[in-house]
Image (cartoon, helix red, strand yellow):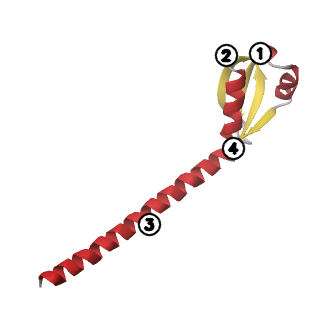
Amino acid sequence: MNSRRYGIGFFVGIFLLSLLYIFSDLRFQSAEEGVRAEEGIVYYLEEEEGKVSIYQGEEHTLYEKTSIPVKQLPAGIQEEIREGKSLSGEGELFSFLENYSS
């Protein structure tokens, strides 16, 4: 009788570990998809009141108003911003902010 209990317990344990593995794998895939979605977002830099403003997505939703003066940026970057410079994903956006924020 005891050996039957241990056998059932063993299979229940294996079953629960399998479920744990499946659900943890699904959570990992979901997190990866979220990162890929974040990287697919396009950000646009525009000049407003002499400072750089950041807009997100094709709808141009305001993401952030920065304190970066456009006049202090290199001439080429100033021109790109006046034309509506676009950045692909958060990586490029953060790189820009890191390089030009004081």
Q: Quadrant of residue 84?
A: top right
Query: What residue does disc 1 label?
Result: 50
Q: Is residue 4 above or below residue 51?
A: below
Task: Please state which amino acid type lies under the numbered disc 4.
Answer: Ile
Describe the element under mark 4 as helix, strand or loop: loop
Describe the element under mark 2 as helix, strand or loop: loop
Marks 3,2: beta carbons within 8 A: no
Marks 2/4: CA–CA distance: 25 Å
Query: What residue does disc 2 label?
Result: 102
Marks 1,4: beta carbons within 8 A: no
In the rendering, at what x and y percent does residue 55 appear?
71, 33
Earlier sequence position, callout 1 versus callout 2:
1
Assess disc 2: are there few (<14), some (14-19) or many (≥20) residues with their C-alpha within 10 Å of its C-alpha: few
Q: Nearer the viewer, mark 3 or mark 1?
A: 3
Earlier sequence position, callout 2 versus callout 4:
4
In the rendering, at what x and y percent does residue 17 appear?
35, 67
Task: Please state which amino acid type lies under the numbered disc 2.
Answer: Ser
Query: What residue does disc 4 label?
Result: 41
The N terminus: image quadrant:
bottom left
